[in-house]
Image (cartoon, rainbow, N blue to C red):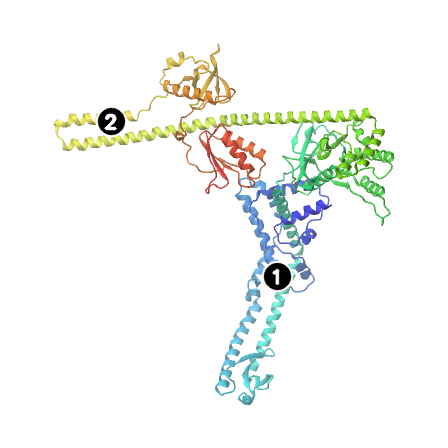
Amino acid sequence: MQVTYILCEDMKRHRSAPIRWGWLINRAPQQPNPIHNESQKLLDQTSAARLITQPLDFTGIHDLTEILTVAVSGQLLTIPELCTVRRTLTAARELFDNLKHLASASNHPQRYLPLLEILQNCNFQVGLERKIEFCIDCNLSVILDRASEDLEIIRSERKRNIEILDSLLKEVSSQIFRAGGIDRPLITKRRSRLCVAIRASHRNLLPDGVVLNVSSSGATYFMEPKDAIDLNNMEVRLSNSEKAEEIAILSMLASEIANSKSGINYLLDKILEVDLAFARGAYAQWMNGVCPIFSLDNFEGSGSVGEDDNFVLAEEEDDFTEMEMEQWLFKYTSQGISDFPVPADFKIRHGTRVVVISGPNTGGKTASMKTLGLASLMSKAGMHLPAKNSPKLPWFDLILADIGDHQSLEQNLSTFSGHISRICKFLQVASKQSLVLIDEIGSGTDPSEGVALSASILQYLKDHVNLAVVTTHYADLSSMKEKDTHFDNAAMEFSLETLQPTYRILWGCTGDSNALSIAQSIGFDRNIIDHAQKWVEKLKPEQQQERRGMLYQSLQEERNRLKAQAEKAASIHAEVMNVYCEIQGEAEDLDRREMELMAKESQQVQQELEDAKSQIETVIQKFEKQLKISGRDKLNSLIRESESAIASIVKAHTPADSFPISEADHASFTPQIGEQVHVKGLGGKLATVVESPGDDETILVQYGKVKVRVKKSRIRAIPSSARNVVSSSSTHQGRQSQPNEEFRGNLEISSNDDLSYGPVVRTSKNTVDLRGMRVEEASVHLEMAINASRPYSVLFVIHGMGTGAIKERALEILQNHSRIANYEPESLMNYGCTVAYVK
């Protein structure tokens, strides 16, 4: 299909290894029908690959197919080919080491296991890699002397022989130059032998020399001196021996590679699996996909399967599971095709085996069915889906689709026979775990016979496949739901106001073809449309047509009402969850904060005690020093001064009583409704009395949004000075707040400058990252982060730049949230990040 081709082209852009796509297709494991566990393993690999943000290095991986073929055939491999094999083996081993390092450095190393398991049992051919490295210098592309003992001896002898021969020829050439036999000394090679140049007129200077060559003009002879003949003979023998030994080394390495062919091929297959996993992960990250969940049941109706285990999608409701996918369907307008896809909601109830989709032409029936089939194929291949939340769908062993016109002159097939022949093949191979998709079932023949044959086919599919989805314009097929609960209907929505299809699926409904409206919107002649409308009125009774229109309108109104109720319920649920999270956070943090305060107070008391001791020691030393230099008449005055200094030190370090009310006053204290009191156990926080004390000596108080009944003995009156501050603050707040807003229990401070938020340092605990989220999802995450933050803390909100929608929504929430005292917009130090101060 064209969509599948486009999907493969998109995947190519997200691969990392520099391997030809055709070679990857040929080398990839050929398994057209993986089992359920293997599909789940592929999904786990994709999820693990999405966790790795930094790209791994695949540049050293090369195509070794031709090299292995040459090695197996017994031919020699060149030095560059051997170096290519070595680089590939090294890159594969380093890739595995990098994966293990990333897993060990992570807080959750088990998440990387799906990727590590791919290469876990691979033989990285370390011995072959080191043997090539030992024999060949890949930087200089030469065979090293240490490759073999014979090669080292031969090259050593040849080097010594060359030095002797070169020294001899230099001396002879210099003698010829001094004798005027040549313009300048010249040593060259002719016929693979070293010789000297000499003028033809002076050849008698080398009486026993051998002429190897003559210049084109005949004026210069290239002669081999007599003393150099044996040395040249030795050079030729050693050169031939060296070449023979190098060929033996290359042959040995080629043989080693040929023997390791199966291991190398297996390693490359596993490397390709890793590369494909990262390609699927990058593609999922690019489209912001989510991991699908496979349903374990095949809809046989066993008692262990609940209604939520049925079919696909993102949001669960009462008796079905829903998935919203962005289908590859573009909405047609009068100006052409718009640039945004229309999401498709798939809601298939538990126990449904056949879904009949009806609706207008060009309304999206076929595209929606293709979307379902493609989503099933993507999940089966381990790819994430462009859906909301967590889509749930069964695992299908076969996905059989009859979409399009299959007429063929070559095979003598008409439109109808082409469809029927394909459906016949489906019925032969389909199983209880198969998905069957049929477009325009029973079309292309007499309507009455087409309906009868289609109904029979659907009855057969109901008992022999997991799920069948068909599109049709036959109203009789939509009525099968009334007789059998295994059937369900769906319709493509059609707007009666604009007379245009909306391309959205209405589950549980039947739709009209609206052929006349579609023809009119395309631009048919008005007279033809009017004439056709008269025929329709003759064929359909007026009352029945009106009743169906009223029924359709009432269903639309009921659908809108239910949708509004669902949105309201979702809003209430979100608010309840926010309150729950806030209460839970306060409850969990209360004991820890109390211990921290006690430890801090103990530390402060210890520090003050040390300071007091130090000051008193200073006074005593000063007293002793003055006592030595003063007379007895000043003793009393020194004692009084020292006692006065010590008394002032003790007074300065004596803590003030936080609750200057005696125990007797506590016992007789009876708070009034609306009065602010201290409750023991709330860390010094203020609470409001909601209900007067009862007979059981308990009082109902409210702290923030929490109402709790506590014993009267745990209630403490606040000092009069603090009471005045609280009273004035609460009065001021009451005038500014809405009537239904609850008092949060935090003591209002007149100036934000008095608050201490500590160092403004970003950590993982005080940071909320909203990048990559939709606006609604980001709003929920930010609200939860603010409610979970400790009082007088700093919150870093990372919204990034992008289109700016996330940033605008985040700033709106920070500006209107009651717990946000102030916030600092992004700056050059915090680009794409806003700092919020929580009350």
Q: Quadrant of the N terminus?
A: top right
Front-most of residues 740 and 436: 740
Q: Which residue bears the numbered disc 1?
A: 82
Residue 655 is at least partly visible in this image = yes
Where does residue 168 sit, x and y in percent of width and height? 51, 81
Q: Label 2: state its secondary structure.
A: helix
Tell me, yes or no, if residue 680 can be seen here. Answer: no
Q: Quadrant of residue 385?
A: top right
Viewer-side residue, 630 vs 670: 670
Q: Quadrant of residue 505?
A: top right
Sequence-wise, which precedes: disc 2 or disc 1?
Answer: 1
- x, y percentage for residue 801? 53, 41
* Pair 2/1: label in front: 2
Q: Residue at x 82, y 40 (%)?
A: 423
Residue 446 lies left or right of residue 814; in this view the side is right
Check the image and report above or below for 771 versus 18.
above
- The residue shown at (21%, 32%) is 621
Residue at the limit of the structure toward the front, as seen here: 527
Decide which of 231, 624 is in the foreground and name it: 624
Tell me if mark 2 has few (under 14), some (14-19) or many (20+) residues whose alpha carbon lies within 10 angstroms of its own: many
Q: Which mark is residue 646?
A: 2
Rendered position, 138 above or below 833:
below
Quadrant for residue 638, please give it.
top left
Side of 710 where 521 appears, left or right: right
- Image position, residue 461 (x, y; %): 80, 35
The amino acid type found where label 2 is placed reads: Ile
Kindly identify which numbered label has been placed on residue 333. Answer: none
On the image, the x and y values in percent for residue 194 come to 56, 79
